[in-house]
Image (cartoon, coloured by chain):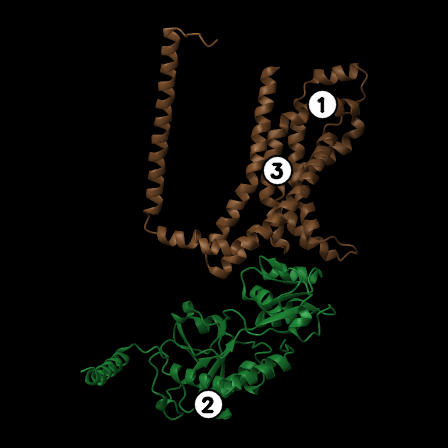
């Protein structure tokens, strides 16, 4: 292969492509640079920039607030893991119940439907208030901690969202798949387990993960019942210093926390698209 | 040369400083009369020879007693009579008048020489009215459910293992973290209402609120709650001042009287008597 010489036309074509690549990179760089400069100049040149910088971007205050915000963030992470698992399980269960066939299952279907209507409509803050400050008012024996109650509130709410996503996935599996499975002699549960659900879950993986990212931000709402999460820790630090930098610290940490999840979502979407195309 | 120029320089500096001090704006109480005018004979009160003091109707415990400001009982009634005494008015020279809280703060002519009604001193209010120097710095207090594990405790150390709550961004929260430093993580709420709910639910051993709020909670809002005690002063406390008409000629005199009472320890003594002992909000040490 070493003595292979591409033809003149081939070499000209390669050179042309190279020139075009360099040219488009240069144009992209220039346009990015111009836009960036414009943004920086218009923001930093604004008359109030000094004040905004002092009250939102003070490195000393950021450093002071970081330990407390991180401690709070750990609470968010723990809650996220448990609530995500709980909500996924509840959502899947509800979706399966809602797609049961046969008149005998009508009450189950109706209950599951009513549940998703109710909890998708209810603001999560109200569910949290009822569970974290209302339910303990019953003063029953063995009342779980505020964190557990808050987690249940989030699972109830997000379970309803996820149930609808799962249902969309289940219903998107073509009827012929069911017919084929039943004709092979699989029972209904077996059909769901081995034929329908695997396809359904794969199809709706991106919106499922999207809801989990939304949950990640909402777990902090448990702080209204007392526990200190990352945003609350930032709020406390802000109240002490009259400076909003701690909020920026918390915001950056949340984005960092979301990046892996979002990356996984994108990767799953891409892989699903490739598989569809390869079929 | 140096030995001769030094005294000259010093003299010049002294003269300059004196001149500067003479020109410097006075940060003293608003252009009130000179202390010499602060006598019963010279004071321009509404009724000459009498001191008319306003407060709200009803006047609440423990600031007043039995809605009778003239009985001298309750913290604010006692303070009012001490101020009057300081200004040279005997008990019989004091007349009380009832003015609604909002009317007292509204601009316009006043029916009192000064009003005492837990008025917090704020810059916004100073636009409309005058305030004396503060006679009370609001303290933080611990409120617990009756029969909870911290009722009847008397030291800060006794509260170490209590689960406490407070509203976010308040001096109350600061009091927990700076003074009590509990081993259990404090709970933080959006509002005092949420904290009170958690207290009622027995999710907390106690909540920290300012003392006036603590009196209100225990007397009117949560019947089975009790004040454990007052915490030492912390943070930037709210202050109560006597309220006077805008640019009242009496402001300077009344402020001087309050300052004298504070310096003599009389205010602290009244606080101890009427808030800590009579009203049952002992000091936590």
Judged from the image, the secondary structure of the residue bearing numbered disc 1 is helix
Q: Quadrant of residue A142?
A: bottom right
Decide which of A259, B143 is in the foreground and name it: A259
Q: Is residue B79 above or below residue A116?
A: below
Q: Residue at x 21, y 85 (%)?
A: B3
- Near mark 3 (Cα within 10 A), the count class, few <14, some 14-19 or many ≥20, is many
Q: Nearer the viewer, mark 1 or mark 2?
A: 1
User: For the residues marked 3 and 2, what is the alpha-carbon distance in whole angstroms?
Assistant: 69 Å
Residue indicated by mark 1: A196
Q: Colour of chain B?
A: green
Q: Which mark is residue B86?
A: 2
Q: Is residue B161 above or below residue B60?
A: above
The chain under label 1 reads A
Q: Residue at x 64, y 72 (%)?
A: B156
The image shows residue B50 at horizontal and vertical percentages of: 44, 89
Residue A134 lies left or right of residue B178; in this view the side is right
Q: Is residue B122 above or below residue A237?
A: below
The chain under label 3 reads A
Q: Which chain is rendered brown in the image?
A: A
Residue A32 lies left or right of residue B147; in this view the side is left
The image shows residue A107 at horizontal and vertical percentages of: 77, 33
- Near mark 1 (Cα within 10 A), the count class, few <14, some 14-19 or many ≥20, is many
Residue indicated by mark 3: A212
The chain under label 2 reads B
User: For the residues marked 1 and 3, what is the alpha-carbon distance in whole angstroms?
Assistant: 22 Å
Judged from the image, the secondary structure of the residue bearing numbered disc 3 is helix
Q: Which mark is residue B227?
A: none
Q: Residue at x 39, y 81 (%)?
A: B251
User: For the residues marked 1 and 2, what is the alpha-carbon distance in whole angstroms?
Assistant: 90 Å
The residue positioned farthest toward the left in the image shown: B1
- Quadrant where the N terminus of chain B sits is bottom left
Check whether the beta carbons of the residues at disc 1 and disc 3 lie within 8 A of each other.
no
């Amino acid at each position: 292969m070493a003595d292979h010489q591409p033809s003149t036309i081939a070499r000209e074509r390669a050179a042309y492509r190279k020139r075009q690549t360099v040219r488009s990179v240069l144009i992209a760089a220039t346009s990015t640079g111009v836009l960036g400069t414009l943004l920086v100049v218009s923001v930093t040149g604004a008359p109030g920039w000094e004040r905004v910088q002092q009250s939102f971007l003070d490195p000393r205050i950021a450093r002071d607030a970081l330990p407390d915000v991180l401690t709070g963030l750990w609470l968010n992470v723990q809650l996220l893991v448990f609530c995500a698992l709980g909500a996924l399980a509840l959502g899947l269960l509800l979706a399966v119940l809602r797609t049961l066939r046969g008149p005998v299952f009508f009450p189950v279907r109706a209950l599951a439907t009513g549940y998703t209507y109710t909890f998708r409509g209810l603001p999560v803050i109200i569910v949290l208030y009822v569970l974290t400050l209302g339910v303990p008012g019953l003063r029953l024996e063995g009342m779980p901690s505020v964190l557990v109650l808050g987690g249940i509130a989030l699972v109830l709410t997000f379970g309803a969202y996820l149930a609808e996503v799962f249902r969309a996935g289940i219903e998107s599996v073509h009827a012929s798949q069911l017919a084929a499975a039943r004709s092979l002699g699989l029972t209904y549960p077996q059909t769901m387990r081995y034929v329908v659900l695997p396809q359904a879950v794969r199809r709706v993986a991106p919106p499922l993960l999207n809801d989990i990212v939304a949950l990640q931000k909402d777990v902090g709402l448990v702080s209204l019942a007392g526990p200190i999460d990352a945003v609350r820790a930032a709020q406390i630090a802000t109240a002490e210093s009259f400076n909003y930098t701690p909020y920026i610290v918390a915001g950056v940490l949340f984005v960092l926390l979301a990046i892996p999840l979002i990356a996984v979502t994108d990767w799953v979407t891409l892989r699903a698209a490739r598989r569809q195309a390869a079929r | 040369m140096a030995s001769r120029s030094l005294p000259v320089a010093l003299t010049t500096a002294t003269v300059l400083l004196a001149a500067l001090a003479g020109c410097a704006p006075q940060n003293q109480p608003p252009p009130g009369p000179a202390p010499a005018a602060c006598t019963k004979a010279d004071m321009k009160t509404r009724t000459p020879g009498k001191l008319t003091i306003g407060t709200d109707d009803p006047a609440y415990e423990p600031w007043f007693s039995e809605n009778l400001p003239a009985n001298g009982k309750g913290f604010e009634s006692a303070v009012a009579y001490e101020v009057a005494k300081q200004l040279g008015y005997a008990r019989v020279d004091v007349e009380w008048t009832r003015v609604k809280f909002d009317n007292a703060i509204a601009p316009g002519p006043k029916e009192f020489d000064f009003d005492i009604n837990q008025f917090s001193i704020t810059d916004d209010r100073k636009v409309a009215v005058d305030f004396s120097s503060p006679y009370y710095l609001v303290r933080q207090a611990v409120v617990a459910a009756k029969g909870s594990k911290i009722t009847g405790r008397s030291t800060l150390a006794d509260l170490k293992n209590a689960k406490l709550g407070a509203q976010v961004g308040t001096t109350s929260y600061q009091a927990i973290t700076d003074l009590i430093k509990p081993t259990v993580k404090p709970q933080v709420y959006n509002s005092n209402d949420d904290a009170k709910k958690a207290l009622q639910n027995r999710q907390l051993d106690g909540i920290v609120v300012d003392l006036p709020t603590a009196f209100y909670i225990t007397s009117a809002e949560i019947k089975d709650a009790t004040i454990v005690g007052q915490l030492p002063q912390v943070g930037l406390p709210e202050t109560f001042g006597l309220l006077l008409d805008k640019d009242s000629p009496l402001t300077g005199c009344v402020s001087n009287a309050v300052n004298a009472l504070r310096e003599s320890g009389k205010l602290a003594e009244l606080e101890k008597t009427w808030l800590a002992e009579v009203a049952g909000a002992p000091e936590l040490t």
